[in-house]
């Protein structure tokens, strides 16, 4: 077993000059500033007054889950002799917000459209999705169910 460190710098950018002197005195914006990588500008969920043009933590979580699944899918498909030609996912997560303001994800559904060559065993290609939860770092870390609704384009 090996441990790995993952780091990022999260820098609050929402100080309008008064800091958090009052609830409405500051913006809920920040940057992710990982060395040698592009800066990602973020805000909180638009339902909570965030900027809808910026990524929020919920966007980043579902995108991370989808990307991890995709990378493992490509790896396992390659190992299985399936030559994936294209992969696009439009995942959806269902969240709930309590009157107290607390929230959580209840579930996520990954909905990839995967392009494979003629003659691909689609049952074999589809079975790979159900193996990924054993290895995907993100999927193994979340505490809500993740389901898969893959579609295949052959050609």
Image (spheres, rainbow, N blue to C red):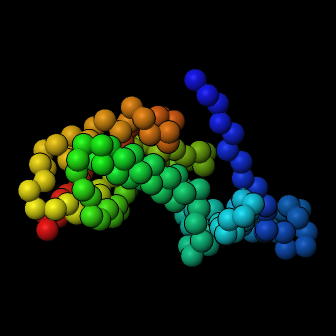
Query: Picture coordinates of residue 101 (x, y %)?
Result: 60, 49
121 or 95, nearer to the observer: 121
Query: Picture coordinates of residue 81 (x, y %)?
Result: 23, 47
10 relative to 148, above or below: below
- Residue depicted at x 47% and y 45%: 105
Query: Picture coordinates of residue 22 (x, y %)?
Result: 84, 62
93 or 90, nearer to the observer: 90
For this view, does 46 lie left or right of residue 37? Answer: left
Quadrant position of residue 26: bottom right
- Residue depicted at x 55% and y 46%: 103
Query: Picture coordinates of residue 57 (x, y %)?
Result: 59, 56
Name the image quarter holding the N terminus: top right
For this view, does 22 lie left or right of residue 93? Answer: right
Residue 49 visible (yes or no): no
Name the image quarter holding the C terminus: bottom left
150 relative to 30, above or below: above
- Residue depicted at x 64% and y 30%: 3
For this view, does 60 lie left or right of residue 72? Answer: right
Residue 75 visible (yes or no): yes
Q: Residue furthest left?
A: 119
For this view, does 3 lie left or right of residue 90? Answer: right
Q: How many marks?
A: 0
Quadrant position of residue 45: bottom right
2 or 70, nearer to the observer: 2
11 relative to 105, above or below: below
- Residue depicted at x 71% and y 48%: 7
């Amino acid at each position: 077993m090996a441990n790995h460190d993952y780091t990022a710098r999260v820098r609050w950018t929402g100080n309008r000059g008064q800091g958090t002197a009052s609830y409405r005195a500051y913006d809920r914006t920040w940057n992710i500033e990982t060395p040698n990588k592009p800066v990602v500008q973020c805000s909180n969920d638009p339902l909570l007054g965030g900027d809808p043009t910026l990524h929020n933590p919920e966007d980043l979580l579902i995108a991370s889950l989808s990307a991890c699944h995709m990378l493992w899918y490509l790896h396992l498909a390659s190992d299985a002799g399936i030559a994936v030609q294209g992969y696009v996912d439009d995942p959806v997560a269902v969240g709930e917000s309590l009157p107290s303001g607390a929230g959580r994800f209840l579930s996520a559904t990954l909905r990839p459209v995967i392009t494979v060559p003629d003659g691909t065993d689609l049952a074999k290609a589809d079975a790979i999705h159900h193996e990924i939860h054993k290895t995907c770092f993100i999927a193994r870390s979340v505490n809500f169910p993740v389901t898969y609704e893959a579609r295949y384009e052959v050609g």
